[in-house]
Image: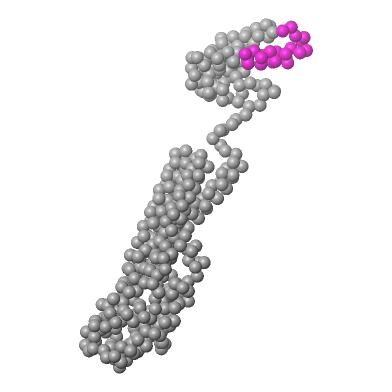
Amino acid sequence: MICPVCGKEYGERNRYCISCGNELVANDIITETEDIAVTDKKTSIIDDGPNLDETDTSASVREFEQRSNITHITNNIIDDTVNDNDDIIPFIMQDEIINDANTVPIAVNSADEPFAVKLGLGAVSLVTALLMLSFLVFGMGSYIGMLLTDESNIERFVKQTDLLSIPAESLNLSAVNDETVLDAIYTMSVGSGVTKETIREVYDSSTVKDFLSENLACYAGYIRTGNNPYRLTTDSVKQVYNDNLPLINVLIGTELNEHDINMAYEEIDKFAPVLDVISVNDVSSGLITPLRIYISMPVFITLTSLAVFMIILIFVINKKSSRSLKWCGIPMFLLGGTILVSTFLVCMRVISIDIGSDFASSMIYDITKIISGNLYLIGGGMTLLSVVFLLLSAMKKKAL
């Protein structure tokens, strides 16, 4: 485009001349005659201006032309508002509209946030995300505690755990070298005609597992509700032995005499220190009470609600949804992935757990296997949700 008055060239987006305010026309229709008209118009503008001395003519003419151009451009903008509203914005955005010494064009992009604002939002979002992660971690701990004290899981644990295969010394039984509980019981039964196969059959077929499951459930109930369980004593163990005596006689093929029974009672009395150790009276109430509160359903619901509130707060803090999804997705991905990987490694015994007792370590492996289904479900769901968040964040950021 070219101005038919002053001859200045512009791009296709301009509709009016910046210098003189005349409407621009296509470059190919300007003729030599119109160039002469430009010269005549400039002369007429100077002649119509104020009376000037010859020495100030040049500066005064420029000032008069600028004021005339401003008025002309303003009138053209007002006329163009009615006729063609779409062309106003490109025209106004030109930084040369007013070529006045006291006017400085300023370009402002409202979509760009100042660095200080971004830094502040990032810091607050980081703290909120860490709080969300903390609530999720403590919520998971509370949920795992409820799983471990569930009676159905305890029953599965007792049936799955082979107590006869654990080291005898872990239960304070007299043992030689690395004898198991089965070896120790067999040693104590020498002379009674009882074999290791018989001991295994008695353990699998008698009510021993039911007895252990019932007592462990009572202890779990104590942790969960505070109700005192039945005290585990040598007399209760002797009662279990008497209840299963007919089965024992059938399995060994002979009837045990009174001497054999009394000898079994003496061996049971040796378990008294073990029973005292696991007695509820020796468990510190100062530790059990906070644990009972922690694994309660109200605490679990509260922690979960706080985590959800942190997620909502992240979306409120960040105006861009893509950034909010990222702040929520990354902590959830870390926690969910950690749950999945840790559960797998423990169940596969890739991670070696040494807490000072082979029996306790074996219990941890067995307990993890029992609740692994719940852990995989939670960890997988959390990881999947975090991946969805991160994908949506990337898609929204790309769209923007």
Magenta residues, dominant SS class: helix
Note whether residue 329 is visible: no
**106 relative position to 165: left or right:** right
Residue 291 in the image: state x and y as whole percent.
Answer: 47, 63
Residue drawn 46% across the image and 62% down it: 292
Note whether residue 49 is visible: yes
Query: Number of numbered discs present?
Result: 0
Nearest the eye: 135 or 60: 135
Residue 290 in the image: state x and y as whole percent.
Answer: 49, 62
Residue 203 in the image: state x and y as whole percent.
Answer: 29, 79
Q: In this view, does 69 lie above or below 245?
A: above
Nearest the eye: 102 or 57: 102
Q: What stretch is highlighted in magenta?
A: 50-71
Taking the magenta stretch, the answer to whether it contains residue 51 is yes
Residue drawn 54% across the image and 47% down it: 125
**21 relative position to 345: left or right:** right
Residue drawn 40% across the image and 74% down it: 231
Quarter-of-image position of residue 207: bottom left
**247 relative position to 364: left or right:** left
Q: In this view, does 302 lie above or below 77?
A: below
Nearest the eye: 46 or 183: 183
Taking the magenta stretch, the answer to whether it contains residue 344 is no
Quarter-of-image position of residue 358: bottom left
Quarter-of-image position of residue 144: bottom left
Residue drawn 62% across the image and 8% down it: 40
Nearest the eye: 363 or 62: 363
Q: In this view, does 284 lie above or below 131?
A: below
Q: In this view, does 286 lie above or below 309?
A: below
Q: Which colour scheme is used?
A: one colour
